[in-house]
Image (tube, rainbow, N blue to C red):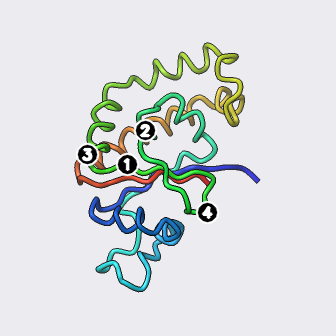
Amino acid sequence: MSIGGAFYALDRYRLRALVIDPATVPGFIRGQGFGSGGSGGHDGPSDSQTVEQAWDVVRTLLPEAVEGEELDGTGALGCIYLTAAHVERTAARLAQRDVQALMGQFTGEPAKFAELYWAKVWQDGAKELAAFLEGVKRFFAGAAARRDAVVFYLA
């Protein structure tokens, strides 16, 4: 079994429901809304960006993407949420990041990153990893433009 991660954008006002009842996060991610109280027709994330098994490399090379609050009780291996204000700051910081420079560092110093989950796979598949990093940048830019909150979910 492998561990995969993804980012999920949601309306900033709906984040509170997830924080109040973290056990609803898996259902939200699957598009099942927020339980019997209804979700006003919105059943799941407004956007998502998978990083699959590159989650550990992504959080190491783009740490600002996961600098939120831990959310326990979700049943996940890890769950972090970022408020809309945090998402805006994160998007601005990510916009300044040069993915090619990060990839050069990651592939040029393999021993430095050897302990990361699937590091060797991603050093060999640098093109796919670069696509994930660019995807994270685009995802946060879109979430910030919508003033969304974000949940990073690791399962």
Q: Earlier in the sequence, mark 1 or mark 4?
A: 4
Q: Residue at x 46, y 40 (%)?
A: 66
**How many numbered dots are placed on residues in this image?**
4
Check disc 1 and give the amino acid type.
Leu
Q: Position of residue 114 (x, y in %)?
A: 70, 24
Q: CA distance from mark 1 to mark 3?
A: 8 Å
From the image, which quarter does the N terminus lie in?
A: bottom right
Around disc 4, counting alpha carbons within 10 Å, would you say few (fewer than 14), some (14 to 19), or many (20 or more)?
Answer: some
Check disc 4 and give the amino acid type.
Gly
Q: Which residue is mark 4?
A: 75
Label 2–label 4 contact, CB within 8 A:
no
Image check: 148 left or right of 4?
left
Label 1–label 4 contact, CB within 8 A:
no
- Looking at the rendered structure, the secondary structure element under dot 3 is helix
From the image, which quarter does the C terminus lie in?
A: bottom right
Q: Earlier in the sequence, mark 4 or mark 3?
A: 4
Q: CA distance from mark 1 to mark 4?
A: 18 Å
Q: Earlier in the sequence, mark 1 or mark 2?
A: 2
Image check: 11 left or right of 71?
left
- Looking at the rendered structure, the secondary structure element under dot 4 is loop
Q: Position of residue 85 (x, y in %)?
A: 25, 45
Q: Position of residue 18 (x, y in %)?
A: 42, 65
Q: Which residue is mark 1?
A: 82
Q: Residue at x 23, y 48 (%)?
A: 145
Q: Which residue is mark 3?
A: 85
Q: Which residue is mark 2?
A: 67
Check disc 2 and give the amino acid type.
Glu
